[in-house]
Image: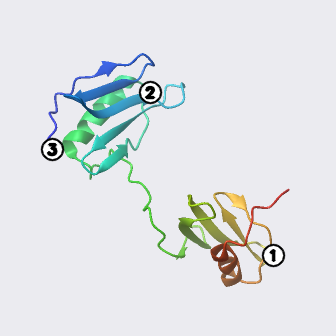
Amino acid sequence: MTYDPEIIWEETGTGSWITLDGDEHIGTVFDKDNQHRWGGVWNGPNGALFLAETHITADGAKRAFERGVVEGSGSDLWSHPRPKRDQGWAPSKKGGLYRYGRWPREKFAIATVKQAKSGSWYGTRDGEMIDGWFDSAREAMRCIDSRACVPRQD
């Protein structure tokens, strides 16, 4: 599918802007939080891609969207989503380990294992600390992998 760089925008009743190719919805520019942080989503040939940055005006977001469509799905103007499959435990940039997987209800989540200043290890899942301290990173990873660990109830 080729896209005409001469994109025509239509304002919706909610203040968002959409662009169509015939009856096909190509994309939307929208105020992300009603705080003048405009984003956009392109329903491109490889699935939905979101603008990597927000813009202070709808026109700025529309211009970025149009450039992104012309440059294609590999453009740096689009954010590139996390992989939708578990790739196992990997070292994180800040120390410790992380894993992208499904816990516990078929929902993708980020799990991390980190070492505290005390030397003990702990884990998080989607930013929530799981219950328990561990003697090693391996113990913490096993707990998370077994799905037995639950978020701490403080």
Q: Residue 65, image x and y in percent? A: 30, 35
Q: Quadrant of the C terminus?
A: bottom right
Which of the two marks, 3 or 1, is nearer to us in this view? 3
Specify how the rendered protein is coloured: rainbow
- Residue 111's x, y, as percent? 61, 66
Per the image, the residue denoted by label 2 is 56
| Spot occupied by residue 78 in the image (x, y as percentages of width and height) | 34, 46
Around disc 3, counting alpha carbons within 10 Å, would you say few (fewer than 14), some (14 to 19), or many (20 or more)?
few
Query: Residue 35 shows which numbered tag?
Result: none
| Residue bearing the label numbered 3 | 1
Please state which amino acid type lies under the numbered disc 3: Met
Q: Which residue bears the numbered disc 1?
A: 118
Q: Residue 52, relative to residue 59: is it above or below?
A: below
Query: Disc 1 on helix, strand or loop?
Result: loop
Kind of residue at badge 2: Ile
> Which sits earlier in the primary sequence, circle 2 or circle 1?
2
Q: Nearer the viewer, residue 107 or 74?
A: 107
